[in-house]
Amino acid sequence: MAVVVVGSLITDIISYVERLPQPGETIRGKSLFIGCGGKGANQCVAAAKLGAECTMIGKLGPVNDPLSRIHIEALTKNGVQRRLFHSSQDQTGSAIIMVDKDAANAMTSVLGANADLKPDEIDSVAESIQGADVLVAALGIPLKSTIVALKKGRKHGSWYLKIIFNAAPAASNLPSEVYQLSSVFCVNESEAEMLTGEKVDSIESADRSAQILQERGCKVVLITLGSRGAYLKDEANNGILIAAPPVKAVDTTGAGDSFIGALAYYMAYYPKLPLQTMVERSCQVAAFSVQKPGTQISFPTKEELPEELF
Ligand code: ATP
């Protein structure tokens, strides 16, 4: 299996409203959308839509929980292999989101079964991890389970497979082994700031932040910068800003997941490409995703993208 993702699955229940309600107030929504999200599921589907053979490792609520079924359907539709666990007591992770006419939102997110993904369960699917070319791991599941996954990707102290670690949702500190086990450590601006204390608002500050992260032990650092693109600091300590193509964005939700899914795809299928080219192409893929509403449904398929990206 080329790409294995260990991470969260969240069912998004989104209502579109004229304005966000005040505490205690009930307002009428215009429409309701139920979709699949969670960083792990999004990154996996993003890579699969580009044509990667993918496996998703994560935890849902009970098998017959309707919120769990829609993930299974979405993963199946996108050709993703599943190594999913089911919790008998926790429901599938969910987010209740209200989006107003100006695209401002209010959200409650319940981790549910994601928070119950046990290190032993990751251990039981170690073969899937070790059979991959690229492992993508993020937060949103217990950190100790993430660490087991990262360790499974390593063999006898050498890089067994390439590991993209996405420190999202934001965390204020991480144990040193997480940095040391990552081949590519990927964060957005606010996640970088939370980990390093360095406000990322310029190329210089992105470089300082990346430097701090590298000093903690990761080889390559990538800081995504929204419409400005991504800052790459490579193994030789060279930093470069890779500009995002100028596009008219309609919905940037999940742009980071589209970017990481694409990077995993390129690392697995085009391992000889320079990393900078992989990042440039991942920026192009993510730029496509922001031009459509939604998350997983906005991720482009190979057929929708220009030939020169392949
Ligand atoms: P999310 O949490 O919504 O998934 P994120 O904050 O993790 O997003 P961003 O840094 O916003 O990630 O975006 C990831 C990548 O997507 C950027 O590096 C860039 O390549 C692309 N991107 C994001 N916004 C735009 C935009 N407005 N125009 C073009 N490309 C964009």
Image (cartoon, rainbow, N blue to C red):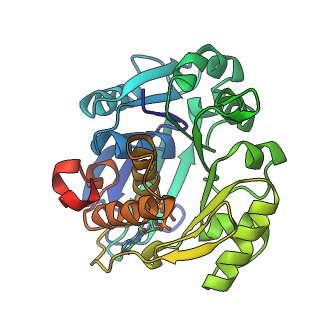
Report the image quarter containing ligand 1: bottom left
Q: Please report the residue visible at 33 percent of the width from the left and 76 percent of the height from the top.
A: 245
Q: Nearer the viewer, residue 258 or 172?
A: 258
Name the quarter where the N terminus is drawn: top left
Q: In this view, does 116 lie above or below 14?
A: above
State the residue at coordinates (75%, 33%).
144
Residue 196 in the image: x percent, y percent?
77, 68
Would you place residue 17 above or below residue 150 in this image?
A: below
Q: Which residue, as the protein is rendered here, is positioned at the far left? A: 303
* Closer-to-camera residue (27/66): 66
Give the quadrant of residue 35: top left
Q: How many marks?
A: 0
Question: In the image shown, does 213 or 272 lie closer to the viewer?
Answer: 272
Residue 278 relative to residue 161: left or right: left
**Is residue 52 visible to the viewer in this orientation of the structure?**
yes
Q: Residue furthest front?
A: 272
Q: Residue 270 appears at what percent x and percent y?
A: 39, 47
In the image, 275 versus 135, the foreground residue is 275
User: Does the image show residue 253?
Assistant: no
Q: Position of residue 225 (x, y in %)?
A: 52, 73
Image-quadrant location for residue 155: top right
Please tell me in which quadrant of the rendered image residue 203 appears: bottom right
Please give left or right for residue 183 compared with residue 245 in the image: right
291 in relation to 163, above or below: below
